[in-house]
Image (cartoon, rainbow, N blue to C red):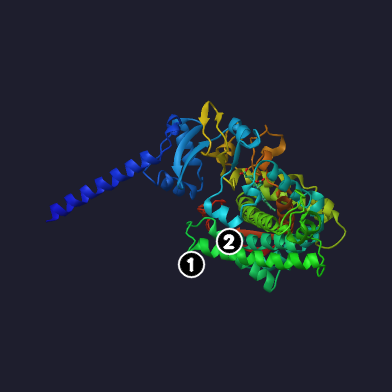
Amino acid sequence: MELSILLIMVLLSILVLSVFFVLQLWYTPKSMEVIPGSLGWPIIGESLPFISEFSSPSGIYSFMNKRQQRYGKVFKTLVLGRFTVFMTGREASKSLLTGKDGMVSLNLFYTGQQVLGPTSLLQTTGEAHKRLRRLIAEPLSIEGLKKYFHFIDTLSIETLEQWSGRTVFVLEEASTFTLKVIGNMIMSLEPSGEEQEKFRANFKLISSSFASLPFKIPGTAFYRGIKARDRMYSMLDSTISKRRNGDEFRQDFLESLVMKHSKARGGEEQDDGDEDKLTDQQLKDNILTLLVAGHDTTTAALTWLIKFLGENPPVLERLREEHKQIQANRNYGPNLTWSAVNNMPYTAKVISETLRRATILPWFSRKAAQDFEIDGYKIKKGWSVNLDVVSIHHDSEVFPNPEQFDPSRFDVPLKPLSFLGFGSGQRMCPGINLAKLEISIFIHHLVCRYNWRPLEKDDAVQPTLVRMPKNKYPIVVEPL
Ligand code: HEM
């Protein structure tokens, strides 16, 4: 009896594996055969080692490194449900990031495409993309950000005062801080109160839906994300209509877009022919895009930076010297000045080294919009092509002893495209000035007034698209 059960199970396993094998052959693009690499198991491909190595302290570096040693700088794989070609190096960066406009587009997951909407900056290409970038460039420029400086400065001081003498999870605190900053910048949200709570709750649901399964049925994270997006859009609709009717005037991002760059009455039912103006749908999709693209990244960067400082006392000491000098140069009070925040050379290097060492976005995902050739390989229209940034940031020829946290690497200018903390080319991060401003101000108040010690040593990483410490970096904070 037992033998026959065993036999049936073996036969069933052979049958299931054969079906998978046939499916694999059927699904695999024939043209990909010339690209070296392995597609792993049928259907799931190499997703399991990819996810498990993603969460390890070295991140996907070990996954990439093993395959690059075996196959070279360009290899194919099947991860997270996609046949993908990974590539690395400055040549690949040049083609994928700064190459011919329209050769590749961003490759969002289905959930991200649905939540952000079709007119999001992340889903446009060519002229439409350039136009959107022009519209957001001015309010995100250094001069454009000056009007939010006081808010960020005061919020940093107040946030840190609540840390003193307590145990805090830096990742959670950084998330609250960066969301308050962007909420205020976009639509003048007060840092506390009912509106802030609603904004935060909706944003959290939207954010979690990106890495969810794509089933839009009640109860799923994806469904909750879409509903939260709709509530967020209703909040924006009511603010936009108040601004248009003149019931409310604020000096924020929304005001500048509504007054200077939006079509009259939303432009949905009438076309005034002005291509340089946005409909309300475009406005909302792109405000949400800025929130989504700017929040987790800045939160992660601030958390990693505080963690790296905690692990590297000589760097902390040198950074503290820079900030104590700034503190000594001002006449009174804890507040920073605008000129001081724009003159923090060592801090700028610490930020860059944090982005190199942590590589918050470990790969940049693209879809080939046309056939092209790269490193001698033909890439076909429609393929997913990922630039492996972790390997670029850990290239020992450019960054000797790459695992070490050493901001002095940035004392000398680097070769173009060897550091991609904020990306490069047409899709380079438009939020770079805001991110640097928030981090520099917060770090100034942290190192001038407080000491901290980590509560545990854990280098594991969350298995999310943006790399963050898994334990949220718990610390105890004391006044200096
Ligand atoms: C330290 C914080 C940040 C880091 C490390 C970061 C990193 C990046 C990187 C590497 C890219 C390029 C990705 C690619 O080429 O695939 C990017 C794009 C982008 N970032 Fe950031 N970012 C940060 C903060 C922000 C902020 C604060 C905002 C918004 C206010 C923002 C908005 C965007 C947008 C909209 C894009 C897409 C640009 C496009 O497709 O044209 N980012 N970011």
Q: Is residue 383 or residue 354 the one in the foreground?
A: 383
- Against 353, is 95 above or below? above
**Mark 1 Cα within 10 Å, few/some/many (few <14, many 20+)?**
few
Per the image, label 1 sits on a secondary structure element best described as loop
Q: Residue at x 72, y 37 (%)?
A: 411
- Mark closest to the chain's N terminus, 2 or 1: 2
Circles 2 and 1 in contact, beta carbons < 8 Å: no
> Which image quadrant: the C terminus?
bottom right
Q: Amino acid at mark 1?
A: Pro
Question: In this image, 348 relative to 72: left or right?
Answer: right
Q: Percent position (x, y) of residue 268?
A: 70, 58
Q: Residues within 10 Å of mark 2 (few under 14, many from 20)?
A: many
The kind of secondary structure element at disc 2 is: helix
Q: CA distance from mark 2 to mark 1?
A: 15 Å
Is residue 27 rendered to the left or right of residue 311?
Answer: left
Q: Which label is found at residue 206?
A: 2
Residue extending furthest left? 1
Residue 125: image location, x then y, percent: 65, 43
**Is residue 167 at all visible to an observer of this figure?**
no
Identify the disc placed on residue 338. Answer: none
- Which amino acid does the dot numbered 2 rest on? Ile
Q: Residue 420: percent from the left, percent from the top?
A: 64, 40
Q: Which mark is residue 218?
A: 1
The residue closer to the viewer here, 393 or 308, is 393
Residue 478 on image: x %, y %: 66, 64
- 2 vs 1, front mark: 1
The quarter of the displayed image where residue 410 is located = top right
Quick one: 369 or 200, which is closer to the camera?
Answer: 369
Ligand 1 has an atom within 8 Å of the beta carbon of the residue at disc 2: no
Horizontal relation, residue 378 to residue 445: left or right: left
Number of marks drawn: 2
Question: Residue visible at 48% across and 40% down?
Answer: 84
